[in-house]
Image: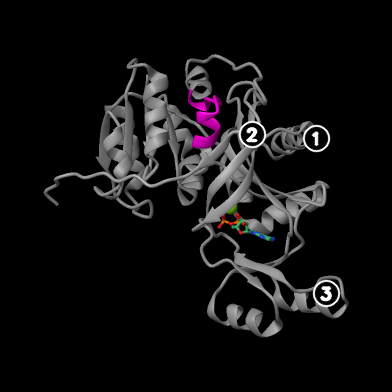
Amino acid sequence: MNILILSVGTRNKIIQYFRKALHGEGNVIATDMSELAPAIYEADKYYIVPSISDPKYIEKILEICEKEKVSGLLSLIDPELSLISLNEEKFNDIGVTIIGSSYEVCERALDKYEMFNWLTKHGYNCAKTYIDKDEFYQDYENRLIDFPVFVKPNRGSASISISKVNNKETLDLLFLNEKDLIIQEFLDGQEIGADVYIDLLSKEVVSIFTKKKIKMRAGETDKAVSFKDKKLFSLLEKFVKEFGFLGQIDIDVFDVNGKYFISEVNPRFGGGYPHAYESGVNHMELIINNLKNKKNIKINGNYKEGNYMMKYNEILIKELNL
Ligand SMILES: Nc1ncnc2c1ncn2[C@@H]1O[C@H](COP(=O)(O)OP(=O)(O)O)[C@@H](O)[C@H]1O
Ligand SMILES: [Mg+2]
């Protein structure tokens, strides 16, 4: 069984974990648009591919799938998730399973304003969100919302262009300089990350790992500690099923005075997944079972609390003729 992982970038550990889970019974094939993406060198085989915005991109990936007899495929970056799910049928036709959510689900999750609308409609706590600045000012005048607020790009990722805004002047300036921003109620609370796997066959939530974020650095969780809470687990299970996610997802939650607020979902392996894996939560095995047409049994919360994760840097040296 061969697995193809797209846009691997610097996610070396994800490739290592898949190779380990396959026990040499198949290859892990990686792609990236750059020879300087260190994770490609962890794979059994790699391909340098065009940018995801190239019209020939999907054709190229389909070619790799056929040549390498790929059974399952996943991407590690947000902008590619909708693209591959949009072409799901073409992949299925050549026997490739996409380990991820449908096109509609990816689009709804990656558009933060759409996500807010969905969460509100379905009765989940979430930060009040505005895409229209005038609407925000109207509520501000009516004392329905106050500064500070949180401003970020509606389809942003990796914490690019995010700001905590304390006054009107700064807000106006941000809106002058950037398009497609949203304004959110500022959530003041404990940030939580959840790594969740939804079985591709039974569509049930089979594994949840939750951690409290202790320190963030450059948009990533730098230090965190594992914990469990039954109330949070059942909230996440209900939410994930209702939204329709499949495969691996990463959820951001805030605990504001004992109430859980759902902030955002990345329908892919999040950068913090190694914390879950190293605590014994092996989602690669769950994926491989699914690709072998085996349903997984529920293992929600099969890990220890109080496991601290501390991130540190690694480097790779290669002699290349570029
Ligand atoms: N409404 C909010 N209130 C307070 N902090 C927030 C809010 N929204 C986002 N953040 C902070 O900004 C970070 C990035 O925002 P997020 O919505 O996750 O976007 P991205 O897609 O860039 O990860 C979060 O991890 C959190 O630390
Ligand atoms: Mg985020």
Q: Is the shortest distance between ligand 1 and the CB of mark 1 under 8 Å?
A: no
The picture quadrant for ligand 1 comes to bottom right
Rate crowding at label 3 as few (under 14), some (14 to 19) or many (20 or more) other CA atoms within 10 Å.
few
Considering the numbered disc 2 on the image, is that residue within a helix, a strand or a loop? loop
Is disc 3 in contact with disc 2, using a CB cutoff of under 8 Å? no
Q: Main secondary structure of the magenta part?
A: helix
Say whether residue 280 is magenta: yes
Identify the magenta region: 274-284
Residue 101, by quadrant, is top right
Q: Earlier in the sequence, mark 3 or mark 2?
A: 3
Please give the label number shown on residue 306.
2
Residue under label 1, please give it: 231
Instruction: Where is residue 98? Give x, y as percent.
Output: 48, 32
Instruction: Where is residue 14? Give x, y as percent.
Output: 42, 34
Relative to 20, is 63 above or below? below
Considering the numbered disc 3 on the image, is that residue within a helix, a strand or a loop? helix
